[in-house]
Image (cartoon, helix red, strand yellow):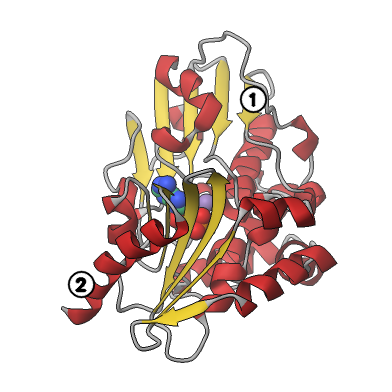
């Protein structure tokens, strides 16, 4: 596999970006790559664009250098889209569109072809972070870079628990922890630790969840009013859908939160029998077979009806 430094040869300006509402893998892979390019190519102007990362990621070195403002008019020599296709880059998509060279590093099955001129897309990879690491020269990796990549991997594998964890994932993780950062504390601080309010919302979501299709599906939603009451951001809802998925007998879990008067952001998780990437893709979203998302228009009941039709068809097949 050609290494990223070869692909950037001659570039004087490089931009890195990931998807909107960035998760741990998105932030870890983008920041890992950013730290690596800053070190390997000090004369190159490398910029990183992301929506404001959650405070839990402040343990990543130089995260304060993330640019959230895309108002500058600049044409980059190279743009690297990580953990996403170009349609979910948000405001940074404008730089992707004008960049002279585009590179895509992703592991979403819904982006199998890749959106760049050069593509490193592998749906079998646990995370974009795992793929980013493979594009690095090992001798240039240091503890800061390793830490960022490690965070990405633990987030997308649920701390090496989900079925996307492979021998390659664990071998990469083994190399990463040899750089000597406090991985145990990192896992607690970025993955398991929840604020009191986050736990209260999780409690609400569990209390108000509804089982259907003979207990094979579960749905729960948080509306705008409740989010305002708890002063919650979308990131405060992370982990709710995972908790719904592990309920005994459940094949498919749906969690939604309201993003507009008639709009919901949907997260789906499957235990294997339902391909939720296919369901999400039908509604214009995407993701992985066991974890996917989309945005739906309509009332809470419209959303459930639309999703359950597709899920039922798969469960009955
Ligand atoms: P989420 O439920 O938002 O945590 O997303 C689960 C997985 O699906 C993640 O890998 C997301 O990157 C992906 N995903 C979520 N929403 C979309 C979307 N609208 N389009 C493509 N992929 C998505
Ligand atoms: Mn992601
Ligand atoms: Mn990912």
User: In the figure, residue 113 lies in which quadrant?
Assistant: top left
Q: Is residue 114 above or below residue 174?
A: above
Q: Count of labels shown?
A: 2
Q: Can see residue 9?
A: no
Judged from this view, the residue extending furthest toward the bottom is 248
> Dot 2, how many residues are within 10 Å of its Cα: few (below 14), some (14-19), or many (20+)?
few
Q: Is residue 51 above or below residue 147?
A: above
Instruction: Pick the residue in front: 133 or 238.
Output: 238
From the viewer's perspective, tell me whether residue 106 is left or right of residue 48: left
From the viewer's perspective, tell me whether residue 265 is left or right of residue 42: left
Q: Is residue 139 above or below residue 194?
A: above
Residue 290 % position (x, y): 39, 69
User: In the figure, residue 99 lies in which quadrant?
Assistant: top left
- Report the residue at 54% width, 62% height from top: 156
Quick one: quadrant of the N terminus? Answer: top left
> Dot 1, how many residues are within 10 Å of its Cα: few (below 14), some (14-19), or many (20+)?
some
Q: Can see residue 101?
A: yes
Q: Circle 1 is placed at which residue position?
A: 47
From the viewer's perspective, tell me whether residue 301 is left or right of residue 56: left
Question: Whole-Å distance between the Cαs marked 1 and 2?
Answer: 45 Å
Q: Secondary structure at mark 1?
A: strand
- Report the residue at 49% width, 78% height from top: 210
Residue 176 % position (x, y): 65, 61
Q: On residue 111, which mark appears?
A: none
Q: Secondary structure at mark 2?
A: helix
- Report the residue at 69% width, 33% height from top: 39
Q: Circle 2 is placed at which residue position?
A: 313
- Report the residue at 76% width, 70% height from top: 200
Q: Earlier in the sequence, mark 1 or mark 2?
A: 1
Q: Which dot, 1 or 2, sits closer to the camera?
A: 2
Quick one: quadrant of the C terminus? Answer: bottom left
């Amino acid at each position: 596999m050609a290494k990223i430094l070869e692909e950037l040869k001659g570039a004087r300006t490089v931009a890195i970006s990931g998807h909107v509402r960035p998760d741990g893998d998105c932030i870890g892979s983008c920041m890992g790559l950013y730290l690596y390019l800053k070190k390997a190519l000090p004369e190159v102007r490398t910029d990183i664009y992301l929506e404001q990362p959650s405070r839990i990621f402040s343990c990543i070195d130089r995260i304060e250098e993330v640019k959230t403002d895309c108002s500058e008019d600049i044409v980059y020599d190279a743009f690297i889209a990580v953990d996403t296709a170009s349609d979910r880059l948000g405001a940074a998509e404008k730089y992707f569109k004008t960049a002279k060279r585009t590179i895509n590093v992703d592991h979403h099955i819904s982006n199998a072809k890749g959106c760049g001129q050069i593509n490193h897309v592998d749906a079998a990879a646990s995370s974009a972070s795992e793929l980013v690491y493979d594009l690095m020269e090992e001798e240039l990796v240091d503890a800061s870079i390793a830490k960022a990549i490690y965070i990405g991997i633990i987030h997308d594998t649920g701390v090496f628990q989900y079925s996307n964890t492979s021998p390659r994932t664990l071998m990469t993780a083994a190399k990463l922890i040899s750089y000597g950062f406090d991985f145990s504390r990192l896992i607690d601080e970025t993955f398991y630790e929840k604020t009191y309010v986050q736990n209260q919302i999780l409690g609400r979501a569990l209390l108000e969840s509804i089982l259907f299709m003979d207990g094979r599906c579960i749905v729960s939603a948080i509306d705008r009013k409740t989010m305002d009451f708890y002063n919650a951001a979308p990131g405060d809802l992370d982990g709710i859908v995972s908790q719904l998925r592990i309920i005994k007998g459940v094949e498919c879990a749906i969690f939604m939160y309201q993003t507009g008067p008639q709009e919901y952001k949907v997260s789906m998780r499957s235990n294997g029998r339902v391909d939720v990437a296919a369901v999400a893709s039908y509604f214009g979203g995407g993701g992985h077979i066991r974890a996917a998302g989309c945005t739906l228009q309509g009332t809470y009941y419209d959303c459930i009806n639309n999703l359950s039709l597709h899920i039922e068809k798969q469960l009955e097949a």
